[in-house]
Image (cartoon, rainbow, N blue to C red):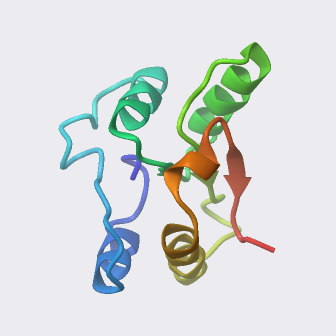
Amino acid sequence: MDVHVPYAITIALRLRGVDVLTAQEDNSHELEDADLMDRASSLGRILFTRDDDLLREGALRQEKGEGFVGVIYAHQLSVSIGQCVTDLELVAKASNPDEWISRLEYLPLK
């Protein structure tokens, strides 16, 4: 979880049995976006964000052909916390990180 993600999403996912690591818990909360994405990739963890800058970083890496572990983005005003939890639980339980290499996904899922 990026630092911009409400903690309620983290708690709700954990209550549903989803393994979540926040940037704060990983002591990576002060990293620049590119470094945070590198950190998530080194851990093999999909990065969830509500920050447009991380979305742009992912798109830039796609354009350059640079690999990264996927980024899932939900706009802060357009996607509710409940919808984020529902969709992220589905992603966590129905896919594996290998399916997310260099992938950008937007919530809500369709």
As drawn, 107 above or below 41: below
As drawn, 54 above or below 80: above
Going 58% across and 43% down the picture, which residue do you hit? Answer: 70
As drawn, 27 above or below 9: above
Circle count: 0
Q: Position of residue 22 (x, y in %)?
A: 29, 52
Q: Is residue 45 visible?
A: yes
Write down the quadrant of residue 109 in the picture.
bottom right
Q: Position of residue 75 (x, y in %)?
A: 66, 58
Going 18% across and 37% down the picture, which residue do you hit? Answer: 27
Write down the quadrant of residue 19 in the picture.
bottom left
Q: Is residue 71 visible?
A: no
Towards the viewer: 28 or 69? 69
Q: Quick check: 8 left or right of 61?
A: left
Q: Quick check: 26 left or right of 81?
A: left
Q: Quick check: 65 left or right of 89?
A: right
Outermost residue toward the top in this view: 64
Going 57% across and 77% down the picture, which residue do you hit? Answer: 90
Q: Position of residue 28 (x, y in %)?
A: 26, 34
Q: Quick check: 101 left or right of 96?
A: right
As drawn, 54 above or below 90: above
In the rendered image, which quarter contains the C terminus? Answer: bottom right
Going 71% across and 71% down the picture, which residue do you hit? Answer: 108
Towards the viewer: 58 or 52? 58
